[in-house]
Amino acid sequence: MHEHLNDVADLPLTYDLHLYSRNDALSIFLRSLSYHRVGAAYLANELARRSRRAIHRALDIGCGEGTFTSTLIREMQIVGVAGPQSIYAFDPDIENLTFYKSRLRGCNELALTTSNSTLERAQLDRSSDLVICSHSLYGMMENPSLTGTERVNQIRRILSSVAPDGLVFMSLASANSPAYEVKRDILRVLNLKNPSAHGEELQSYLILAGSGAKATYHSSYMDVTEILDDSSAMIKWCSYFCRVPENQLQMLGQDLLRKIINRHILQFRSATPELQKRMKEFPAALGSPADATVFLPHREIFFVTS
C-alpha cells in the first residue's frame, strides 16, 4: 500500500483544517494562480472531444469559492457544451459556499444545491454526469490521521458517484512543479515536514482504486509580483501555500521569505515567446501579465476518467 510520504520522517508535521479554509491568505493566494483557466479550458475541450453536447447534473467536490466552476461553464459555452442544469456542491468552509453561490448566481436556469461538508461526511450517489475535483483533495490527502487505505476508499467513493457514461475530473499539482521549490525551502528553514500531496500520489491511489485514468501534465504559473511588494500579503500567501500559521512565518522575517521566493522567480519579459503567449491566453486571476510581471512556473496533473 502506498502511504503518504513526507520529506523527513522525524520532523514535526503541522495539520490544521483552518489552514485549508477561506481567509485573507486564501484570497491572496488564489489571485496569483492561473490554473483555474488552464484546467477549465482543458476539461471543456475534453467534454467536446468526447461528443458530450450537454451536462445535466454535476457534482462539485470541495467546490471552494467557485472560480474553477464558473470559468468551466464559460469555457463549455465556447466549445458548444451546454449545462450543467444542476450542481450539487459541497465544501467544509461555509464562507466558501457563500462566495460560490454568488459567483454562480448569474448562470441562468441552474439549480444549485450546496452543503457544508467534507468529502468524508458527504452523501454521494451515482447520478452525476460530471464530477469535479479541481485541486480539492489536498485536505483529505494531507490529513495525517488517514491511512493510505482510507484515502483509496475515498477515491473509490468519488469514482462511484458518476453516472454511466459520465466523467470524473481530478487535478493536483505535480511533485515536480518548480513553484513547489519555494514551499520546500520555507518548510526546510522552519524544520517542518513537507505535507504536500501531489498528482503522482493521486495517480497511485487511482490505480489502487481500480481506475484506468491517465495523467496529463499541464503548465500554469503563480504571479507573485504583488506579494513581493507587500510584506503582509507575502506572509499570508506563504501561509496558505505552505499550510503554516502566519506567526511562524513572521518569525522568519520578510527579508528571508522574499529571498527564498526571489531564488525561484522568472521574469515575464525574459520568457520565451511561446510561454508569454500561453500566459496571456491563460492569465492568473490578477490579470494579464506585463513586462514587470514576475512569476513561479507551476506544473499540475489532470485526470479524466469515466
Image: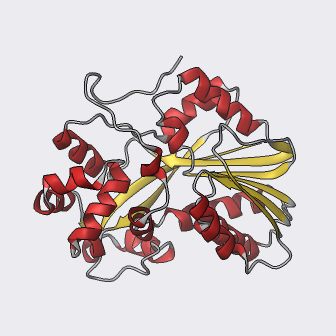
Q: Quadrant of residue 276?
A: bottom left
x and y percent of residue 181 in the render?
A: 27, 48
Q: Is residue 238 left or right of residue 58?
A: left
x and y percent of residue 119 in the render?
A: 65, 42
If the image is split into quadrants, where does the C terminus sit? top right
x and y percent of residue 149 in the render?
A: 59, 21
Q: Residue furthest top?
A: 1
- Residue 264 seen anywhere in this rendered image of the structure: yes
State the residue in front, 61 or 145: 145
Q: Is residue 64 left or right of residue 219?
A: right
- Residue 294 seen anywhere in this rendered image of the structure: no
Give the vertical position of 176 relative to 221 (above or below).
Answer: above
Q: Residue at x 61, y 59 (%)?
A: 94
Give the vertical position of 217 relative to 23 (above or below).
Answer: above
Q: Is residue 80 left or right of residue 249?
A: right
State the residue in front, 134 or 20: 20
Q: Residue at x 87, y 61 (%)?
A: 56
Q: Residue at x 36, y 74 (%)?
A: 273
Q: Is residue 24 left or right of residue 226?
A: right
Q: Quadrant of residue 274?
A: bottom left
x and y percent of residue 199 in the render?
A: 50, 41
Q: Residue at x 26, y 65 (%)?
A: 234
